[in-house]
Every structure is written in C-alpha cells, then in structure tokens.
C-alpha cells in the first residue's frame, strides 16, 4: 500500500453520496439557501443523527433552528417519543422550519419551537433534563453557551458545537476574526474541562462534541 492520502473533498463527496438526504431534507436545505442560512451538510447531519442515537436521546435542545435541516437530522436519531426544543431569534427562520417539519410529516408535539435569543431562553430550561444539546447559533457566543449546555445535560449527555473548524479558518493562524478566535478558545476550554470527554470531528465545517462525565 502506498499510504498516500486521497483527496479529502472527494471523500466527503463519496460519503455524502453514500448517505443521501431524502426529499424533505433536500427541500429544507433549499429553503436555507434561499435566505442565506448556513446549514449542516449531509455528512455532519448524519453525525448528529448518530450522536442522538448513541445517547438514546429523548430530550434535546437545538440553538439555531435555521430552516430545519439539522432539526430533521436530529429527529431521525432521537427516540420515537423524543422531543426537540429548538431556539432561534429570527421568526423567518422558524417559519421556514415549520414548513420543513410539516413537509416531513413530523408530529407537532415532537418539536417545540421557541423564538428568542439563545442566552435569554437557556436559563429558563431545566437542569439535567436533556440528553443532547446542539449549538449552531451565534459563533461568537459559543463560550457562553457551553456552561448553560453542560448545566442542561444529564450525566452521559452530549453537547455539540457546529462550525467548530470554521471552514478551515480555525487552523489558519492568520485568521483573527471574532468567530474564529471564539472557536479556538472554545475548543481549548472543552478539551481542558475534566468534566467532559471531548472530540473534534472533521466533518462539514467541524463538529466539536463532548460527553458529560458521570460524577465519581
């Protein structure tokens, strides 16, 4: 074997083709694109679905509803009776997400949409009541989301930050914009937190995931 690396972009394309999105996810992605909303790609979406399934999630929180792309992926991994609470400050985003959910035939009781800024809504949610928290909202606020997310999680629950590699900018030392600096600091804080078991997954624009350890 030569040991040579294949083209990473080619690998990502092959994986995306291996696990294609269904028509409702494709429609949700189109809605997101039409209004300029970033959405997790199919490979990252499948990883989110896997994490939801691995944690046996029945109660999950999503920061940043967008047009419902990640929402639909998460629902595929949640338990059949699972409920997802999704928070977004833009009413138009949640209007689009409602259309995506309706098209996918998702029962109304499975998703609780809350309009508002994440840092204003999170303190109203119960301690230790959730299995998974996905943070896909304002990147510059990610460090503020972390303690709230950990508070919400049960032991063994997982927090996930989307966009953790910033499309390659996090690894570029010349990139010094606010979102990139926040992503670097978040990665360091999560890595060094003894209460978390972390992993940085190079899928899409990056997923920073961590499981809340069981107390000794």
Image: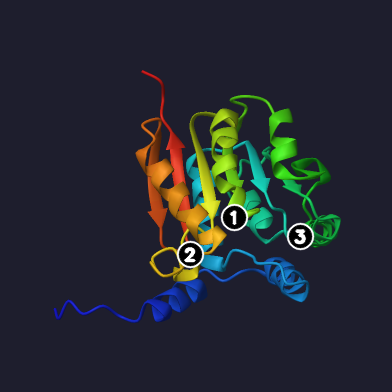
Q: Is residue 96 above or below residue 61?
A: below
Q: x, y (%) of residue 143? A: 54, 44
In the image, which disc is placed on residue 103?
Answer: none
In the picture of the structure, the residue carrying the numbered disc 2 is: 176
Circles 1 and 3 in contact, beta carbons < 8 Å: no
At mark 1, the secondary structure is: helix
Foreground residue among 214 and 38: 38
At a point 80% along the width and 40% down the height, the residue shown is 109
Residue 140 percent across, percent down from the top left: 59, 53
Location of the C terminus (image quadrant): top left
Q: Where does the image place residue 154, in percent across and percent down from the top left?
A: 54, 27
* Display colour scheme: rainbow
Relative to residue 167, is residue 144 drawn left or right? right
3D distance between C-alphas at marks 3 and 2: 40 Å
Mark 1 or 3, nearer chain start:
3
Badge nearest the viewer, 3 or 2: 2
Q: Residue at x 30, y 80 (%)?
A: 6
Q: Quadrant of residue 127?
A: top right
Q: Is residue 186 left or right of residue 138?
A: left
In the depicted view, which residue is nearer to us: 139 or 82? 139
Cα distance in 3D space between marks 1 and 2 = 14 Å
Compare residues 91 and 129 and report the one nearer the observer. Answer: 91
- Label whose residue precedes the other's in the sequence (3 or 2): 3
Relative to 67, residue 197 above or below: above
Q: Earlier in the sequence, mark 1 or mark 2?
A: 1
Residue 139, numbered circle: 1
**Residue designated by label 3:** 104
């Amino acid at each position: 074997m030569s040991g040579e690396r294949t083209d990473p972009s080619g690998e990502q394309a092959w994986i995306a083709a291996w696990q294609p999105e269904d028509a409702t996810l494709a429609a949700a992605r189109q809605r997101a694109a039409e209004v300029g909303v970033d959405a997790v790609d199919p490979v990252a979406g499948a990883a989110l679905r896997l994490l939801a399934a691995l944690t046996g999630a029945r109660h999950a929180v999503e920061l940043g509803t967008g047009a419902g792309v990640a929402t639909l992926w998460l629902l595929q991994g949640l338990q059949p009776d699972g409920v997802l609470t999704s928070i977004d400050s833009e009413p138009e985003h949640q209007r689009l997400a409602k259309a995506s959910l309706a098209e996918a035939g998702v029962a109304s009781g499975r998703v609780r949409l809350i309009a508002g800024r994440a840092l204003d809504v999170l303190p109203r949610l119960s301690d230790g009541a959730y299995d998974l928290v996905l943070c896909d909202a304002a990147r510059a606020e990610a460090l503020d989301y972390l303690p709230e997310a950990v508070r919400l999680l049960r032991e063994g629950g997982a927090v996930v930050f989307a966009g953790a590699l910033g499309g390659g900018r996090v690894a570029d030392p010349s990139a010094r914009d606010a979102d990139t600096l926040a992503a670097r600091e978040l990665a360091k804080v999560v890595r060094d937190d003894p209460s978390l078991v972390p992993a940085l997954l190079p899928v899409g624009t990056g997923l920073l995931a961590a499981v809340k350890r069981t107390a000794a």
